[in-house]
Image (cartoon, rainbow, N blue to C red):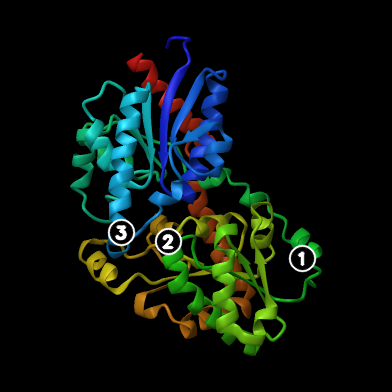
C-alpha cells in the first residue's frame, strides 16, 4: 500500500452502526498511523473518531416497510446527495455499515467506480430471501459479518466475506458495576430493579414503552418497592418520560431514567432482570449478566409482510445461535403487559432459573468472538487487506 494519506468514505444509518463505525475508525486510524481521512455520514461517535458527516445520521434512521413511506422523499434526496458527494471525493474505499435499505441502493449506483465497496454487517439472508446473497455479490467487493455462520451464504456466490465477531463485545458492558450504580442513586441492594429498554427509534418506543410501563405496574403489585431503571438516549428522554408519566401515574416516582451513556452499563448491571426490545441491547444485557425477557411488536402491516418472508423461529441473537429459546420472547399479539410481567416474575422469584439463562447465554456470547480477537481489529485488518490488493 502506498504511504499517501488515504480517503475512506463511511456511512452508518443508526445508533448501533454509529458505535460500530466509531470503533472501526479509531482502529483504522491507529493501524494507518494517522494517514487517513474519513468522510461520509455518521453520528456523534463516528464524528468524534474524525468523520466529517455530510448530514445528520438521523435522517437515515428508519425501520419497517410502512415506516419508510413518510420519509421516502428525504431518503431519496439524501441518497442522491451522498452519491454526488462520493463522486466528488473519489475515496480510496467506501465502507457502508448496516442500513441496507439505503446503503445497498447507494452501492448499486457506485458499483462501476474504481474504489472497493465494503459492507459491514451482513444482511440477514439466513432469515429471509436467501437469494439476496447472490444479488449482494453483484455490487459489493467484500463483506464483514458479525455472526459466525454468515460467510458461506455469500462466498458461494464469489463475494469474499470475513467473520470479524460482534462489535458489542467491545462495548464495555461486561465491565459494568451494578453496585456502583446503586450506591450512586442510594438504592438499597434488597430493592428489586427492573430494567426497561423499549428501543432506540421513535416509532418502536411509541409502541413498546406503554406496554413495558404497564408490565412494571403489574409487577409492582407483587414487588411494591421495585424500581424501574430506564436507560435512554438523551434526545429520546422527554418522549419516554412522557409515556411513563401517562401510563404509571403516581408510580412514576419509582422510575429512574438514565440518559448518560457513561452510566448506561452500570445501570443495566444493577438490574435483577430486564424487559428489552429485540435488538443489540439484548447482547449488552447478556454481557452485563442480566437475565431478561424480550418483547417486540411491529406495525400490523409490517408484521404481516414480514411473516411472509421470515424463516426464523426466534428473533434474539442468543436464541438464534443455539436454535432454542434461552431468553423468553413475546412477539406481536403475545407482546402484552400480562405475558411480560408473568415471565419477569418467574425469573425474580426463581434465582436458579435466572442463573440457567445466564449460563446458556454465555455459550452464545463465546460464539460471537472471532479467533479471540477484538471485532474492530479483525474488521480493520480485513479492510486493509482489501485496500492492499487494490492499491
3D distance between C-alphas at marks 2 and 3? 23 Å
Please tell me whether residue 367 is drawn above or below residue 139 in the rendered image: below
Q: Position of residue 179 (x, y in %)?
A: 77, 61
| Callout 2 crowding tier (Cα within 10 Å): few <14, some 14–19, many ≥20 | many
For the residues carrying marks 3 and 1, which lies nearer the camera in this image?
3
The earlier-in-sequence mark between 3 and 1 is 3
Numbered badge on residue 254: none
Counting from the top left corner in percent of width and height, residue 248 is at: 60, 84
Label of residue 316 in the image:
2
Q: Is residue 193 visible?
A: yes
Query: As rendered, which of 167 and 239 lies closer to the eye?
Result: 239
Q: Quadrant of the C terminus?
A: top left
11, 284: nearer the viewer: 11
Q: Is residue 182 left or right of residue 244?
A: right
The residue indicated by pointer 3 is 68
Give the x, y percent position of residue 197: 54, 66
Residue 144 visible in the displayed image:
no
Q: Would you say 48 lies left or right of 280 here?
A: right
Q: Pointer 1: residues within 10 angstroms few (<14), some, or many (20+)?
A: some
Q: Residue at x 32, y 51 (%)?
A: 74
Amino acid at each position: 500500500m502506498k504511504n499517501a494519506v488515504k480517503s475512506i468514505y463511511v456511512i452508518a444509518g443508526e445508533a448501533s452502526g454509529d458505535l460500530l463505525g466509531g470503533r472501526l475508525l479509531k482502529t483504522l486510524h491507529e493501524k494507518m498511523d494517522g494517514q487517513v481521512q474519513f468522510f461520509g455520514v455518521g453520528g456523534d461517535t463516528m464524528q468524534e473518531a474524525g468523520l466529517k458527516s455530510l448530514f445528520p445520521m438521523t435522517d437515515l434512521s428508519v425501520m419497517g416497510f410502512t415506516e419508510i413511506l413518510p420519509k421516502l422523499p428525504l431518503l431519496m434526496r439524501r441518497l442522491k446527495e451522498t452519491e454526488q458527494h462520493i463522486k466528488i471525493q473519489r475515496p480510496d474505499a467506501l465502507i457502508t455499515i448496516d442500513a441496507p435499505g439505503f446503503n445497498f441502493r447507494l452501492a448499486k449506483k457506485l458499483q462501476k467506480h474504481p474504489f472497493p465497496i465494503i459492507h459491514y454487517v451482513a444482511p440477514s439472508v439466513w432469515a429471509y430471501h436467501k437469494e439476496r446473497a447472490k444479488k449482494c455479490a453483484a455490487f459489493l467487493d467484500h463483506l464483514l459479518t458479525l455472526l459466525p455462520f454468515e460467510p458461506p451464504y455469500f462466498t458461494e456466490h464469489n463475494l469474499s466475506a470475513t467473520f470479524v465477531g460482534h462489535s458489542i463485545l467491545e462495548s464495555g458492558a461486561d465491565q459494568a458495576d451494578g453496585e456502583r450504580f446503586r450506591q450512586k442513586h442510594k438504592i438499597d441492594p434488597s430493592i428489586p430493579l427492573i430494567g426497561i429498554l423499549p428501543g432506540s427509534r421513535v416509532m418502536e418506543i411509541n409502541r413498546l414503552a406503554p406496554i413495558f410501563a404497564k408490565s412494571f405496574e403489574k409487577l409492582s403489585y407483587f414487588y411494591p418497592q421495585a424500581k424501574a431503571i430506564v436507560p435512554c438516549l438523551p434526545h429520546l428522554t422527554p418522549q419516554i418520560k412522557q409515556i411513563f408519566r401517562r401510563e404509571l401515574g403516581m408510580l412514576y416516582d419509582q422510575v429512574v431514567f438514565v440518559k448518560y451513556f457513561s452510566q448506561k452499563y452500570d445501570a443495566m448491571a444493577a438490574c435483577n432482570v430486564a424487559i428489552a426490545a429485540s435488538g443489540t441491547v439484548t447482547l449488552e444485557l447478556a454481557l452485563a449478566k442480566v437475565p431478561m425477557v424480550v418483547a417486540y411488536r411491529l406495525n400490523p402491516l409490517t408484521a404481516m409482510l414480514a411473516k411472509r418472508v421470515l424463516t426464523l423461529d426466534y428473533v434474539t441473537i442468543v436464541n438464534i445461535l443455539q436454535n432454542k429459546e434461552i431468553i423468553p420472547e413475546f412477539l406481536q399479539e403475545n407482546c402484552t403487559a400480562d405475558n411480560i410481567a408473568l415471565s419477569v416474575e418467574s425469573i425474580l422469584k426463581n434465582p436458579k432459573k435466572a442463573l440457567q439463562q445466564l449460563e446458556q447465554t454465555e455459550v452464545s456470547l463465546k460464539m460471537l468472538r472471532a479467533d479471540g480477537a477484538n471485532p474492530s481489529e479483525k474488521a480493520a485488518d480485513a479492510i486493509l487487506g482489501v485496500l492492499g490488493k487494490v492499491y
